[in-house]
Amino acid sequence: MAKVKHESSWYPLEPGESVLDALLRQGVSVPNACRAGACQSCLMRAVAGPVPEAAQAGLKETLRAQGYFLACTCRPPEGTVLEVTGAEALRVPARIATLTPLSPSVLRVRLETDSPLSYRAGQYLSLIRSDGLTRSYSLASLPREDALELHVRLLSGGAMSGWLAHDARPGDRLQVQGPVGSCFYVPGRPEQPLLLAGTGTGLAPLYGIVRDALEAGHAGPIWLFHGARTPEGLYLTDALRALAEQHPQLHYRPCVLEGGTRDVAEGALDVLIRAECPRPVGWRAWLCGDGPLVLSLRKKLFLAGLSLKELHVDAFLPSVPLAQRLPDAGAR
């Protein structure tokens, strides 16, 4: 039987059980959200004992060298003795600056950190409440701005989103951990056509990426598609239309599955993209939002000629609490 020491106590692991599941099962509070190795909110550090290589997949080399691993994907072999600590050293204290509704289902949360956070627009971070509740959200802000901006989808029964919408107040303290993710703009090819597509709060990273590209002087055509089921699911439409008016290379296309209007196209996101951008050979693309949808769109764009190395995908995953409660907007 494998066992793990955490805060001076030893905890046994069942065969094939992850460190995260074992600790949660035995009443230990460990920050976590997706439990799929994506959000990295369950990072822990091994101070003694071997860590399976798979538990460090996707981590920066600097973190691997320090012994950090993902508790949700760490399944030590039988007989392993592992001593671990949390990832408190990687967290940055922060406070809520403002809470602003962007639509009936999306809340803009702006945070001010006690110390500077180095990130790229479009990456995501983990938001950690004082009781350990953790969810991951994409960054819609630019590094030069004085606050971190998150777009939180409000769901009935959502633990973090419900708290932010109904109980949190400006000035409330929490922590952030990150950033994570490779969905961000890299300068160097200013004439290359860009395609950005997302659903729901998948707009958050795209909003940061498109503004970053424009500020970097990107001159090639930029196509931004934002999809929702109905017009009520869209947000920041006025701001994005104004941005497109200021930058003629930016083409903003809001779309819905039902209830389209003169200014909002109606139809499936992939169909509308194919109509406007039929042959994206040589383009660069970012796809963010609902997991199955963006992964399907990634395949279709690849078949249409877009190189896989130019396709950057941030597929949002639902948070999965141990007791299988209602999913939150935890994976943004």
Image: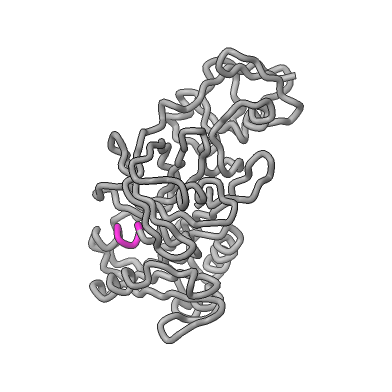
Task: Identify the residue at horizontal 52%, vertical 21% (top origin).
Answer: 85
Q: In this rendering, would 16 be left or right of 209?
A: right
Q: Which secondary structure dominates the residues rendered in magenta? A: helix
Return the x and y of residue 223 as percentages of the image width and height: 38, 71
Residue 149 in view here: no
Asked whether 226 falls inside the magenta stretch, the response is no
Residue furthest to the top:
8
Task: Identify the residue at horizontal 58%, vertical 19% (top origin).
Answer: 6
Asked whether 211 falls inside the magenta stretch, the response is yes
Task: Identify the residue at horizontal 51%, vertical 70% (top origin).
Answer: 228
Q: In this rendering, would 310 be left or right of 54?
A: left
Report the front residue among 329 and 191: 329
Q: Quadrant of residue 290?
A: bottom right
Residue furthest to the bottom:
262
Query: Above or below — where is 72 with respect to 253?
Result: above
Q: Which residues are magenta?
A: 208-212
Instruction: Count the labels in the image.
Output: 0
Report the front residue among 1 and 239: 239
Quick one: quadrant of the N terminus?
A: top right
Q: In this rendering, would 29 be left or right of 167?
A: right
Q: Quadrant of residue 55?
A: top right
Report the front residue among 138 and 68: 138
Residue 153 in view here: yes
Return the x and y of residue 94 as percentages of the image width and height: 35, 37
Return the x and y of residue 34 as percentages of the image width and height: 58, 44
Q: Quadrant of residue 51?
A: top right
Task: Identify the residue at horizontal 42%, vertical 86% (top origin).
Answer: 262
